[in-house]
Amino acid sequence: MKPLVQVHNITAAYDNNVVLSNVNLDVNENDFIGIIGPNGGGKTTLLKIIIELLKPASGVIKKDPNLKIGYLPQVNSIDKQFPITIRDVILSGRFVNDKWWSKPSKQTLQKVDELLEFIGLKNVHNMPIGELSGGQMQRIFLCRALMSNPNLLILDEPNTYVDKTFEASLYNLLGELNKDMAILLVSHDVGTISSMVKTIACVNGGLHYHHSNKITNEVLQSYNCPIELVSHGHVPHRVLKHHEHE
Ligand SMILES: Nc1ncnc2c1ncn2[C@@H]1O[C@H](COP(=O)(O)OP(=O)(O)O)[C@@H](O)[C@H]1O
Ligand SMILES: [Mg+2]
C-alpha cells in the first residue's frame, strides 16, 4: 500500500476560528474513501488543505512526488458568471500537466471529445457555462478533473444536483476509475456511499476513520456522529443530524 497523501495532526482555521483540529488521514493507492459529516463539519476545508488551496494553521502534509490530483469542487463554489464554454472548462483540466502556453495535443483534444460524449453534452460544447444546470456543471467539472489523468480523484458532493440516471452511471464510472486511481468522495448520501466506498471518514471538527464501508448507527454514535435512518422506497438512507464533537 503506497501512501499518496499523509495528513498529520492538522489544524485548520479561518481567521482565528478553528474548524478542524488534530486531523490525521492517510490516503493510499487504490483507496476509495467516503467522507461524511454534517454541514459545516469541515469536509470541504479538509479537501482544500489536501489540494493546498488552504494552508493548515498547524500540522504537516506529506505527498508522494508523483501525486496528481483531479478535483471536482462543490458546485456552489464555482463562479458561473465566468465567460467560458463547456469545452474550454474541460480542456482547462490539462494545465495540471501542460504548460499554459502550450497547444493542446491531438490526444488531449480527443480526450475532451470522449468526455463530452460520455456526459452527453457534445452537441452543446460551445455553450457558456452560465446557461447550465447544476447537474450539468457537475458533469463538466468531473470531466475537467479527469483531464489530467490523476492518480487521486477528489470529489466534493458530486451528486448534489445530478439526476438519478446520471447518478447511476457516475457511480459505475467511479467504480471503474478506482481500478486506476484513489478516490476521496464527499457525499451526504451515506446509503449510496457505503455501498460504493471501501472505507469511511466522518468529519465533524475532527476526523474519525472507519476501516470498512459498513457503517451502522452504533458505529457512528461511538464516533459521536449520530445518524438517522430514513427510508426512500426500498433503499435505506442514513441522514446525518447536526452534532457536536467533544
Ligand atoms: N472561506 C471561509 N471563510 C470563513 N469561514 C469559512 C470559510 N469556508 C468555510 N468556513 C466555515 O468553516 C466551517 C467548515 O466549513 P466547510 O469545510 O465548508 O464544511 P462542510 O464542507 O463540511 O460543509 C463552517 O463553519 C464554515 O462556515
Ligand atoms: Mg462542503
Image (cartoon, rainbow, N blue to C red):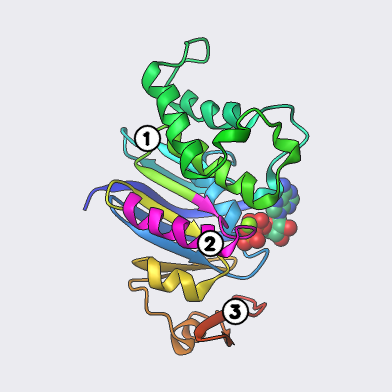
Q: Nearer the viewer, residue 29 or 74?
A: 74
Is disc 1's CB within 8 Å of ligand 2?
A: no
Q: Residues within 10 Å of mark 1 (few under 14, many from 20)?
A: some
Q: Amino acid under label 2? A: Thr
**Is residue 105 visible to us here?**
yes
- Ligand 1 found in image quarter: bottom right
Occupied quadrant, residue 209: bottom left
Q: Amino acid under label 1? A: Asn
Occupied quadrant, residue 79: top right
Q: Where residue 145 appears, x then y in whole percent?
A: 48, 39
Which marked residue is nearer to the observer: mark 2 or mark 3?
2
Using the image, tell me which numbered label, if any, was put on residue 93: none
Q: Residues within 10 Å of mark 2 (few under 14, many from 20)?
A: few
- At 44% from the left and 55% from the top, the residue drawn is 184
Q: Where residue 134 appears, x then y in whole percent?
A: 68, 51
Question: Disc 2 marks which residue?
Answer: 165
Q: Is residue 185 magenta?
A: no
Considering the whole magenta stretch, tell me its main secondary structure: helix
Q: Where residue 240 appears, x then y in whole percent?
A: 60, 78
Q: Is residue 164 magenta?
A: yes
Question: Disc 1 marks which residue?
Answer: 149
**Is residue 14 visible to us here?**
no
Q: Earlier in the sequence, mark 2 or mark 3?
A: 2
**Mark 1 to mark 2: distance in Å?**
25 Å
Q: Secondary structure at mark 3?
A: strand
- At 56% from the left and 85% from the top, the residue drawn is 233
**Mark 3 to mark 1: distance in Å?**
33 Å
Question: Disc 3 marks which residue?
Answer: 239
5 shown above or below 149: below
Query: Magenta segment, which residues?
Result: 155-177
Q: Nearer the viewer, residue 117 or 225?
A: 117
111 shown above or below 176: above
